[in-house]
Amino acid sequence: MTILHDDRLFPPDPETRSIARRLYGEVRNLPILSPHGHTNAQWFAEDTPFSDPTRLFIVPDHYVYRMLYSQGVPLTDLGVGADSEPDPRTIWRQFAKHYYLFRATPTRMWLDYAFQELFGMESRLSSENADKFYDVIAEKLQTPTFRPRALLERFRIEVLATTDSPLDTLLHHRAIRALNLKTRILPTFRPDPVVDPDFDLFHQNVRKLGELTSEDTGTWVGYLAALRQSRARFKEMGCTTTDHGHPTAATADLDETTTAALFRKVTSEKASSEEKELFRAQMLTEMARMSLDDGLVMQIHPGSFRNHNAALHQKFGRDVGADIPTRTDYVHHLHPLLNRFGNEGRLTVILFTLDESTYSRELAPLAGHYPCLRLGPPWWFHDSPEGMLRFREYTTETAGFYNTVGFNDDTRALLSIPGRHDTARRVDCGYLARLVADHRLDEDEAHEVARDLAYRLAQHAYKL
């Protein structure tokens, strides 16, 4: 018995399923490009074994603990927070007891993939076998083949990008670079801590940015110079992209005098909510201007109401699984930036969304017109088989395949990366097989598109 079926996610019709199998055979063993993620560079710099299954699978993964919390399991019982349950085996048993909650979710598929393909488990996790799972995984984690660097090779990860603050020294990336690993591990420039006035400790962060760069970030000119210098430092470490997690997709194109006055107000802690939003909007346009100069690809990840659960935010801090998608306007909000730079072939802006209603109405038409725009894959709440299929169905008719950028996993959970990419490749092969079966695409073309979606589009869009 195995946990996963060989034909999972393929169309049920036998003829179409056969086409999907052939397409999948073309891409299943391609190297993985992971150009946007949240793994920890320290893991690879130090190559220390992961301590136990709980801290690998549960504690860092908000997909896991938000579901359990929704069913009444306290976060402290899952290892979250300073006052949490200290025994990892007890936490694991709690997880196993509630594993049924993940039925039909992508999280279940990624976890089952790791359990079967990496650890050789051939039955579903449950309360009855929780200790067996724990012991097998814990034992293997202490072997050389399960150290972080070895896993990168085992997963055939060719490129792995982390996500990093401008205030990060990148010391771990410097250490990694000296190792000459087969996997290229690159930083990504995420300026939110120093461009979002609502970010925790924003004012202290702006001052620290000045200290790190020896620029006067008390002035608009010095602040921009500090950001340019930080981007250059990231680029020296191999960075090819920036990433922007703003609440909305709003952009602005203010004149320099108005922007300088807005900056003074924002950094004096006297700005209104509307002025803070306007500043974030202007900073997206400034980042696009800088990308034209230094060539970094720009990713915009808007539309999340972060830390929605105020009580959890106060007790546990940021990123504890209480972020909620919101409606997002791309047509009007991006217009100032696109009016300024949208026709620039040298600029690449990759758009993501948590608002699926925008796929066919806004995003596909925008990317199907502006040379600078590309569509990122289904993200966060929608990186599921259904979400991936909806993305293809709603965007291909207008944007085609080649105004998209393949797949990226966007994960903190290292062991989920191959499972996530396998899911995306299976869904895309199923979609292409239907087009072949409908005589809308020849099979030789489908084979080429399958390879593009699995590898070449990401390689090109992210300058890898």
Image (tube, rainbow, N blue to C red):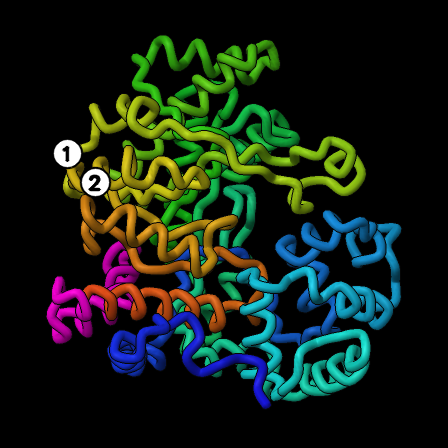
x, y percentage for residue 388? Answer: 39, 56
Q: Which residue is drawn at 32% across and 41% down?
A: 359
Judge whether 231 appears above or below 106 on screen: above
Q: Which residue is drawn at 15% across and 42% down?
A: 345
Q: In this view, does 176 lie to the left or right of 447?
A: right
Say which of 408 and 98 sits in front.
98
x, y percentage for residue 111? Answer: 60, 70
**Residue range (magenta):** 436-464
Whether the magenta-drawn stretch holds residue 457 is answered as yes
Q: Do the residues labelled 2 and 1 touch (CB within 8 Å)?
A: yes
Instruction: Answer whether residue 353 is visible to the viewer in this image.
Output: yes
Q: Please rate how many residues cluster around mark 2, counting C-alpha atoms within 10 Å: few if below 14, some from 14 to 19, many from 20.
A: many
> How many labels were placed on the picture?
2
Return the mark for residue 372.
Answer: 2
Magenta region, main secondary structure = helix
Say which of 347 and 86 sits in front.
86
- Mark 1: which secondary structure? loop
Instruction: Answer whether residue 172 is visible to the viewer in this image.
Output: no
- Mark 2: which secondary structure? loop
x, y percentage for residue 127? Answer: 80, 74
Residue type (three-letter) at the residue carrying disc 2 = Cys
* Residue under label 1: 343
Q: Is residue 163 left or right of residue 346?
A: right
Q: Residue at x 29, y 46 (%)?
A: 394
Return the mark for residue 83.
Answer: none
x, y percentage for residue 360? Answer: 28, 39
Q: In this view, does 273 lie to the left or right of 7?
A: right
Q: In this view, does 402 lie to the left or right of 406?
A: left
Q: Quadrant of the C terminus?
A: bottom left
Whether the magenta-drawn stretch holds residue 253 is answered as no
